[in-house]
Amino acid sequence: MRRALAALCLLLAACAPQGGNGNSDGPAPGPLLPQLAARQDRVERLRLRGAGGRVLVSLHRERGEWRLAERADASADAARIAQYLLLLAQARRIEPKTESPAMYPRLGVEDVADVDAGGHELELAGQGVDARIVLGKAHRATGHSYARLHGQKRSWLLDVDAGFDPDPRAWLQRRLLEVPLARVERVRIRPREGGDFALSRRDDRFRPEDAPAVAVGDSLAGDRIAAALDGFEVEDAGTDRGRPASRALEFELVDGATLGIEVWRDGPRDWARISARLDEARAQAWARQAGKPGLPAAARAQVAEWNRRFAGRSYLLPQELASTLMLDYERILRGEPAVAAP
């Protein structure tokens, strides 16, 4: 009987997780990345790898702005990145788990070089920051992540869900423009098929310039087009391959800047490219009218910034926004069809 009890005790001791001073590999419970607490703003690169070592998401800073390599270096969502880095800086190891490579797949913390790896490896680099973390599965009860620091055998349960979204689109800066309707003076529309026309503010709304006000009636379709730059959001981004546009819209702003949106259909969805230019004569006239001689320089800087951000890239439009930008002349006059009451 004593021998059986002794054997049972030895078996339980062998199966129990080792932590604290008994941990032969890795630190005791505590912060996952102690060096990150005071250095979140020094991180310059985040790279996520999946099974087979394939790079899934690459984020890097360029002149202080986060960019997404998988989307033609389009602007990334800096606020979301900062939020994730804060979470990671506060993440703690709370429960030691297996240090046996044979058991890693159960937690998803095996080396991602394995083609069947179930987790992801996140690499962080920057001034005073150099870390690689294997982010595994979520704990069934709490949803918190299993994780293992690169080069260490011991795996851990964290006190947070530290999962890093492997879809590049999740890290894209989706809101590209915020130009209030009050800044829009005119919208010139050039369809590939049909005649060109322009919208400008008359009375209380944007109307086709060649149509009498009475012809527009109560239609607000012109306002919808003119307001499209206020909260202009996209769903995806890529490299601009120079596809011919089915429609070009030029939004002339009161300060002399013009934002151009060219739209084309690719499969079932619509994509767009964005460009900007400055009419110096209109900019100077606006500055004189406002009594602020520095306005043209500010407009010039804004146009340069827009072109720096958007040149060489194309953007997938949400369907509602695409429908608005593609409204034809007759629909602008008639307005949107009435919705039948239930």
Image: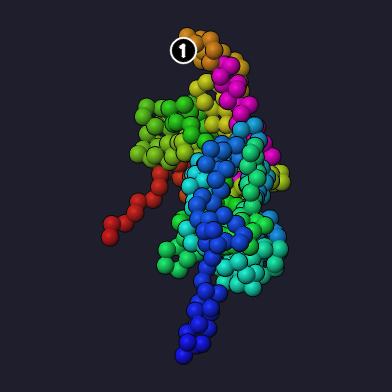
- Residue furthest out toward the left: 342
Q: Residue at the spot x=54%, y=27% of the render?
A: 252
User: In which image quadrant can residue 112 be found?
Assistant: bottom right
Between 167 and 323, the one lying in front of the other is: 167
Q: Examine the rendered structure and indicate whether residue 30 appears above or below residue 296.
A: below
Q: Residue at the spot x=64%, y=59% of the render?
A: 152
Q: Residue 284 lies in magenta, yes or no?
A: no
- Amino acid carrying label 1: it is Ala
User: In which image quadrant can residue 272 be found?
Assistant: top right
- Within-10-Å neighbours for mark 1: few <14, some 14–19, many 20+: few
Number of on-image labels: 1
Between 166 and 137, the one lying in front of the other is: 137
Between 286 and 218, the one lying in front of the other is: 286
Q: Position of residue 1 (x, y in %)?
A: 46, 90
Q: Position of residue 156 (x, y in %)?
A: 53, 61
Q: Position of residue 331 (x, y in %)?
A: 46, 45
Q: Residue at the spot x=61%, y=33% of the render?
A: 64
Q: Examine the rendered structure and indicate whether residue 230 appears above or below residue 9.
A: above
| Relative side of 108 to 8, left or right | right
Q: Position of residue 322 (x, y in %)?
A: 52, 47
Q: Residue 300 lies in magenta, yes or no?
A: yes
| Relative side of 14 to 126, left or right | left
| Relative side of 87 to 111, left or right | left
Provide the residue span drawn in magenta.
296-319
Secondary structure at badge 1 equals helix
- Residue furthest out toward the front: 2
Q: Residue at the spot x=52%, y=58% of the render?
A: 20
- Residue furthest out toward the bottom: 1
Q: Identify the residue position indicated by label 1 in the image.
A: 290
Query: Would you say the magenta stretch is mainly helix, strand or loop?
Result: helix
Is residue 45 visible in this depiction of the protein? no
Is residue 41 visible in this depiction of the protein? yes
